[in-house]
Amino acid sequence: MSLTFSEYQDRAAETAFYPGAGNNPIYPTLGLAGETGEVCEKVKKVIRDNGGTFDDDAIATIEKELGDVLWYVARLAAELGLDMDQIAQANLDKLASRKARNHLSGSGDDR
């Protein structure tokens, strides 16, 4: 099954049950931070417990956590009135511009 980011964003809204949903960017921001931490924890455990080898179980676990990250990104974008397709395209455009100017590495938002 294939879907656009915007379609995902719309469908994620169907499961958005939290205080002030539709007018609360704080909740998905905090959820995003928490889920991102969970992804980091899973990767850390691969290093600690599996010598850095990502076996099928580790990858499946991380995939689930990345899905949670995506849900919170979609909800935060929706709370701010942003469209996920536009966010994705703008990001690719930014990276293509940096590549064309040989500025992919380095730091700063305005490279």
Image (cartoon, rainbow, N blue to C red):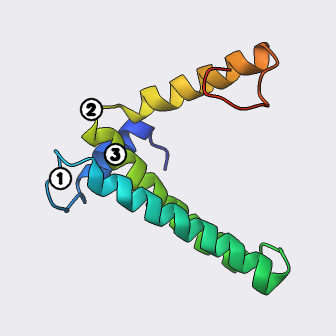
Whether residue 64 is visible, yes or no, is no
Q: Label 2 amino acid?
A: Gly
**Which callout, 1 or 2, points at the residue further toward the start of the chain?**
1
The reply to whether the C-beta atoms of the residues labelled 3 and 1 are less than 8 Å apart is no
Measure the C-alpha gap from mark 3 to mark 1.
Answer: 10 Å
- Mark 3: which secondary structure? helix
Numbered circles on residues, count: 3
Q: Label 3 amino acid?
A: Leu
Q: Position of residue 13 (x, y in %)?
A: 25, 50
Circle number at residue 81: 2
Measure the C-alpha gap from mark 2 to mark 3.
Answer: 9 Å
Which residue is at a point 45% across and 42% down the rendered structure image?
Answer: 3
Which residue is at a point 43% across and 57% down the rendered structure image?
Answer: 32
Q: Is 12 situated above or below 57? A: above
Whether residue 32 is visible, yes or no, is yes
- Mark 2: which secondary structure? loop
**Horizontal side, residue 108 vs residue 82: left or right:** right
- Mark 1: which secondary structure? loop
Q: Label 1 amino acid?
A: Ala
**Which callout, 3 or 1, points at the residue further toward the start of the chain?**
1
Q: Which residue is labeled 1 in the image?
A: 21
Which residue is at a point 13% across and 54% down the rendered structure image?
Answer: 20
Q: Is 66 situated above or below 76? A: below
The one nearer the camera, 108 or 39, is 108
Are there few (<14), some (14-19), or many (20+) residues within 10 Å of tag 2?
few
Q: Position of residue 64 (x, y in %)?
A: 52, 68
Circle number at residue 76: 3
